[in-house]
Image (spheres, rainbow, N blue to C red):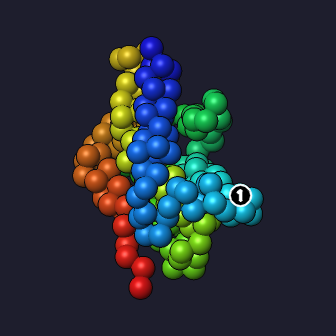
Amino acid sequence: MIKNINIAIIAMVVGVFLSGCSTISVNGFDIKRHFKDTSTKQKLAVIAGAATSIGTHTAGHMIAAAFMGQSYRFEGIHEMFEGPLTREEMQWVGRSGPLFQVTIGLLIEALFDGTAFADGYHITSLIEIGTYPLIHATNMPENGADFLGDYQALRAGGADAGLEWVGYTALALYPVLRSTQ
């Protein structure tokens, strides 16, 4: 059931992104320009930016684990921390991925503004951070999940997960909507 919900949400986001937005240009990002009327080099740059965005999110969790002296393992695409966590550590486990992702995103915006790589990074960050609560809404122990999503970990640690989600989503949205001059 959970896997089917995740696949359905991802399919809807991709479908809207590729078809419904095909005539929209945001901050110079145009689906036709980047995927239909461009060189293989530009297409690969968008894909590299997207992969970097996802990798940066994961790296944020790995950096937090290193600072906390916690070991972790991967189960699929999820980082599983091994060992008990304090409430404060639980908060940092939750916020480290999106916080690092948007921080690096703002650096990429400053260094690579207007490039296909930056567009791929920013669009992927916005989709991942913006839809994260929907995709991982059922990842709670009472639902049989063996891990908590980022915002569930924040909530379990006593943080205001909704407020943090709004902040990270706004920071991910900023480079996408920022007007170029």
User: Given the current orientation, which residue lies at the most extreme right position?
Assistant: 40
Q: Does 85 sit left or right of 162 as displayed?
A: right
* Disc 1 secondary structure class: helix
Instruction: Report the residue that reaches farthest toward the bottom.
Output: 181
* Residue 92 visible from this viewpoint: no
Which residue lies under the disc numbered 1?
44
Instruction: Please provide percent x and percent y for residue 119.
Output: 54, 64
Q: Camera-side residue: 166 or 181?
A: 181
Residue 2 seen: yes
**How many marks on residues?**
1
- Location of residue 74 with respect to 20 vertically, above or below: above
Q: Is residue 39 left or right of residue 76?
A: right
Q: Quadrant of residue 87?
A: top left
Image quarter in which the N terminus is found? top left
Quadrant assignment for the C terminus: bottom left
**Place of residue 59 in the rendered image (x, y in percent of width and height, measured from the top left):** 60, 53
Q: Is residue 163 rendered to the left or right of residue 21?
A: left
Residue 32 in the figure: left or right of residue 5 = right
Query: Where residue 114 appears, x then y in whole percent?
Result: 54, 74
Q: Residue at x 53, y 76 (%)?
A: 113
Q: Nearer the viewer, residue 103 or 31?
A: 31
Name the amino acid type tagged 1: Leu
In which image quadrant can residue 178 be found? Answer: bottom left
- Rendered position, 36 above or below 94: below
What residue is drawn where x is 50% and y is 61%?
Answer: 30
